[in-house]
Amino acid sequence: MLAITLPLLWALLATMGFGLLFRAPLRDLPFAALGGALAWGAYMGMRAVSDSDAFSYFAASIAVGLYAETLAGLLKRPAALFILCSIIPLVPGGGMYYTMFYAVSGRAPEASSALFATLSAAGAIAAGLAVASAIARIIWIKKPRPFFGGKKE
């Protein structure tokens, strides 16, 4: 149980720290922090059932995107506020570090492998957020009114 809750707690705290550092409104900070825990929980859950790191990032970013879009509609705030904070636990900072470390050390094969993994993760995150945004627009968009005749809603 501790092996599951402790990483979620760290993700929540890291997201809250990021939100404070970048001056997110205090009234929205708990929701953003919960989004960070959701992001890491979704990533860990998908990582447990899939061997693909990129797919895990993709699924977790879809969860974050839908969470942020839902909160944006409910709280009447921009979704970007929740997305930017909540996505922090997924950012592949370690991969970027190791890419540079291997490159500077002259270990080209390891550098290219780490670069590919990092770019795959970043691309999966971006694609997942785009898919979530598209899904949210399809689900929550209002139907247009007819111009001539027909029932008025």
Image (cartoon, helix red, strand yellow):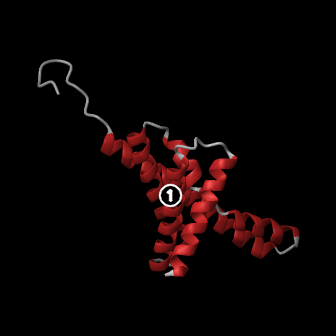
Q: From this view, report whether residue 120 is shown above or below residue 5.
A: above
Query: Which residue is most to the front?
Result: 27
Rendering coords of residue 149 (x, y %): 12, 19
Rendering coords of residue 106 (x, y %): 87, 72
Left or right, residue 21 beside residue 103: left
Q: Residue at x 49, y 38 (%)?
A: 78
Q: Nearer the viewer, residue 68 or 91?
A: 68
Q: Nearer the viewer, residue 108 or 114?
A: 114
Splitting the image into 4 quarters, where does residue 24 fall?
top right
Residue 52 visible in the displayed image: no
Query: Which residue is most to the top?
Result: 148
Q: From this view, report whether residue 59 is shown above or below residue 107.
A: above
Left or right, residue 134 beside residue 150: right
How many numbered markers are drawn?
1
Residue 152 visible in the displayed image: yes
* Helix, strand or loop at mark 1: helix
Rendering coords of residue 146 (x, y %): 19, 24
Amino acid of disc 1:
Leu
Q: Residue at x 32, y 38 (%)?
A: 141
Rendering coords of residue 33 (x, y %): 55, 56
Query: Which residue is most to the left?
Result: 150
Q: Residues within 10 Å of mark 1 (few under 14, many from 20)?
A: many
Splitting the image into 4 quarters, where does residue 8 fall?
bottom right
Which residue matches tag 1?
34
Q: Residue at x 52, y 47 (%)?
A: 82
- Which image quarter is the C terminus in? top left
Q: From this view, report whether residue 91 is shown above or below residue 79.
A: below
Query: Which residue is most to the right?
Result: 105
Splitting the image into 4 quarters, where does residue 102 fall?
bottom right
Q: Nearer the viewer, residue 79 or 92?
A: 79
Q: From this view, report whether residue 129 is shown above or below residue 141.
A: below
Left or right, residue 119 beside residue 143: right
